[in-house]
Amino acid sequence: MQVNVSSRHGHISSDVRDYTIGRIEGLGKYNSRITNVDVVIDQSKDVHAVELVAHVGHSSPLVAKHSGEDLMPVFDATYDKLERQLRKLKDRKKEHRPHHGQAPAAEETEETDEDLFEGEAEFEKEL
């Protein structure tokens, strides 16, 4: 998995970069088809905004955004949002189980006269 960390309107320290890359690499346990994750940190005077974009297989990218005053809690909140989306995607894939061309086994039941309609019971007796 490739992790791209970029910044708008500021500089990212190596500690923050290492922390974000370490956390993002942990997302592989939710989906092995994550090709790359883009981390965009937007810094202004009082507000930090973090955007995470995860590209997963052939599906559309998952996007999580959050903003606030402190950078690290904002990143953690954004990470939690993306993690929740990946978990939900994994659950949807797990619940969808194709039958691979096999029909479910049909149970054979004997029909009694009580299960048949009135006209069908008389027709069955004639045969």
Image: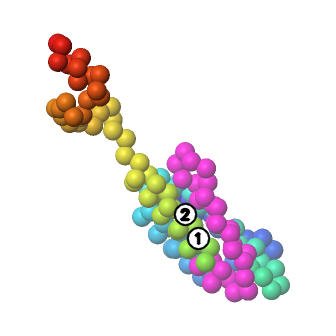
Disc 2: which residue: 85
Whether residue 43 is visible = yes
Q: Residue at x 68, y 69 (%)?
A: 65
Magenta-colored span = 49-76
Q: How many residues crowd around disc 1 within 10 Å: few (fewer than 14), some, or many (20 or more)?
A: some
- Occupied quadrant, residue 15: bottom right
Q: Which of the two residues, 5 or 81, is positioned nearer the viewer here?
A: 81
Q: Residue at x 61, y 54 (%)?
A: 61
Q: Is residue 120 magenta?
A: no
Instruction: Identify which amino acid the numbered label 2 is placed on.
Output: Gln
Whether residue 21 is visible = no
Q: Residue at x 29, y 22 (%)?
A: 119
Q: Is residue 71 magenta?
A: yes
Disc 1: which residue: 81
- Occupied quadrant, residue 114: top left
Q: CA distance from mark 1 to mark 2?
A: 6 Å
Residue 8 against residue 14 in the figure, above or below: above
Secondary-structure class at tag 1: helix
Q: Residue at x 23, y 20 (%)?
A: 122
Where residue 36 is drawn, which disc sits there? none
Residue 63 against residue 10 in the figure, above or below: above
Q: Are marks 1 and 2 in contact (CB under 8 Å)?
A: yes
Q: How many residues crowd around disc 2 within 10 Å: few (fewer than 14), some, or many (20 or more)?
A: some
Left or right of 109 on screen, residue 77: right
Left or right of 127 on screen, residue 70: right
